[in-house]
């Protein structure tokens, strides 16, 4: 009877060990990753990671960074690059989907999902138009 009892205990121990290892291998939940972010925010940001990238990595999910859209002629990825090339003209943000340009200071300047910086006169020549709010103010 004694050998059967130790074999059963040993088998139970091995089973529990296997369960513990599988539980340790499970990814963290989003709330656990958010708590880790809050506790170590300064050091994580110093390494150059955004919260979204950190949480995705923490959860073990592959992170696919967005690829920047290809820019057309006379379009610039950064505002400073546009200012360097538009020395005598105003820099605007053009939304390539709606074909509307947004002047500096407007709420959509640099914020739409698709778009780029351009010189205002070049954007008009390319077929972009001013937003309706700006056109009404000019009338």
Image (spheres, rainbow, N blue to C red):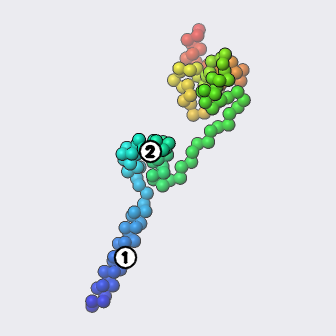
The crowd level at tag 1 (other Cα within 10 Å; few <14, some 14-19, many 20+) is few
Residue located 53% across and 52% down the image = 62
Q: Is residue 16 above or below residue 26?
A: below
Where is residue 22? Give x, y as percent.
41, 66
Residue located 59% across and 14% down the image = 135
Q: Quadrant of the C terminus?
A: top right
Asked if one can make out residue 23 in the rendered structure from this viewpoint, the answer is: yes
In what element is the residue under mark 1?
helix
Q: Is residue 5 above or below residue 28?
A: below
Which disc number belongs to residue 44? 2
Q: Is residue 23 above or below residue 42?
A: below
Where is residue 46? Give x, y as percent.
46, 41
Residue at the top extreme of this rendering: 139
The count of marks equals 2
Q: Quadrant of the N terminus?
A: bottom left
The answer to the question of whether label 1 and label 2 lie on touching residues, with beta carbons closer than 8 A, is no
* 114 with respect to 13 (left or right): right
Residue located 58% across and 20% down the image = 103
Asked if one can make out residue 95 in the rendered structure from this viewpoint, the answer is: no
Residue 110 sits in quarter: top right
* 43 with respect to 139 (left or right): left
Residue at the left extreme of this rendering: 2
Q: Is residue 57 above or below residue 110?
A: below
């Amino acid at each position: 009877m004694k050998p059967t009892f130790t074999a059963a205990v040993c088998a139970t121990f091995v089973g529990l060990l296997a369960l513990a290892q599988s539980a340790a291998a499970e990814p963290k939940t989003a709330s656990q990753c958010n708590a880790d972010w809050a506790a170590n925010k300064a050091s994580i940001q110093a390494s150059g990671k955004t919260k979204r990238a950190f949480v995705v990595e923490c959860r073990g999910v592959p992170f696919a960074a967005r690829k920047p859209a290809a820019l057309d002629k006379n379009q610039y990825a950064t505002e400073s690059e546009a200012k360097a090339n538009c020395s005598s003209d105003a820099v605007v943000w053009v939304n390539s989907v709606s074909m509307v340009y947004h002047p500096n200071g407007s709420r959509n300047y640099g914020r739409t999902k698709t778009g780029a910086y351009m010189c205002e006169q070049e954007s008009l020549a390319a077929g972009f138009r001013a937003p309706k709010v700006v056109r009404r103010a000019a009338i």
